[in-house]
Amino acid sequence: MSSPSSTDTGVYRDRLARARAAMVHHGVDVLLVSVGRDLPYLTGYEAMPLERLTMLVVPKDGDATLVIPRLEAPRVVEQPGVFTLLPWGETENPVEITAGLVGAGAGRVAIGDTMWARFLVELLPLLPGAAYERAVGVMGDLRMKKDAAEIALLQRAGAAVDRI
């Protein structure tokens, strides 16, 4: 996998900033994104839908962390200023790691729609008092409104089709 360019990193940094602004607007303390389309949108990494947890933890304040199985970590290009990588090993509990990153003080937690239910069920008792909601309130508008990088890609795709 090639390293993202500084332009790519800037795109993801901007998207994460816009996600945090949406979190503040919706009163969300932390965003949890697992497999699905929101993860590559925010990080550039498309997780394999494994039985092992991959989770991007995005607090409204503080650094985003990608919790990932150690065996998948080599596939990820870490992007300083976007997220840090936290690989977990076979003897570690990634749901407990995620809960530790969320912290006990999180009041509202937005969960990505495609996170496996088993991980949410395991997370619920680890964050007592947290209120949960779907992440679509945070991510929906962001993904509907195309940023400059997405518009450029769509224009290139359209031009390629026109050439055919």
Image (tube, rainbow, N blue to C red):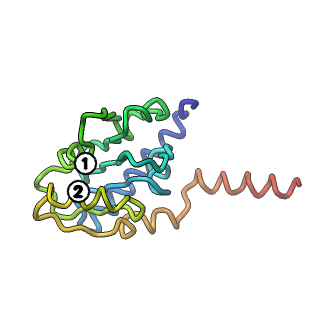
The residue to which callout 1 is attached is 95
Q: Residue 122: which numbered mark, if any?
A: 2
Q: Amino acid at mark 1?
A: Val
Residue 42 appears in the rendering: yes
| 146 left or right, relative to 106 | right
Q: Give me the residue at 47% from left, 50% from top.
A: 49
Instruction: State whether residue 93 is above or below residue 18.
Output: above
Quadrant for residue 86, please give it.
top left
Q: Please, what secondary structure does the residue beneath circle 1 have?
A: helix
Q: Position of residue 75 (x, y in %)?
A: 49, 33
Question: Looking at the image, is mark 1 or mark 2 earlier in the sequence?
Answer: 1
Please give the name of the residue rendered at 25% of the width and 54% of the height, measured from the top-left corner. 60
- For label 1, the crowd category at 10 Å Cα-Cα, with few meaning under 14, some 14 to 19 and many 20 or more, is many
Q: Report the Cα–Cα distance between label 1 and label 2.
A: 7 Å
Dots 1, 2 in contact, CB < 8 A? yes
Residue at the image position 48 percent from the left and 39 percent from the top: 9
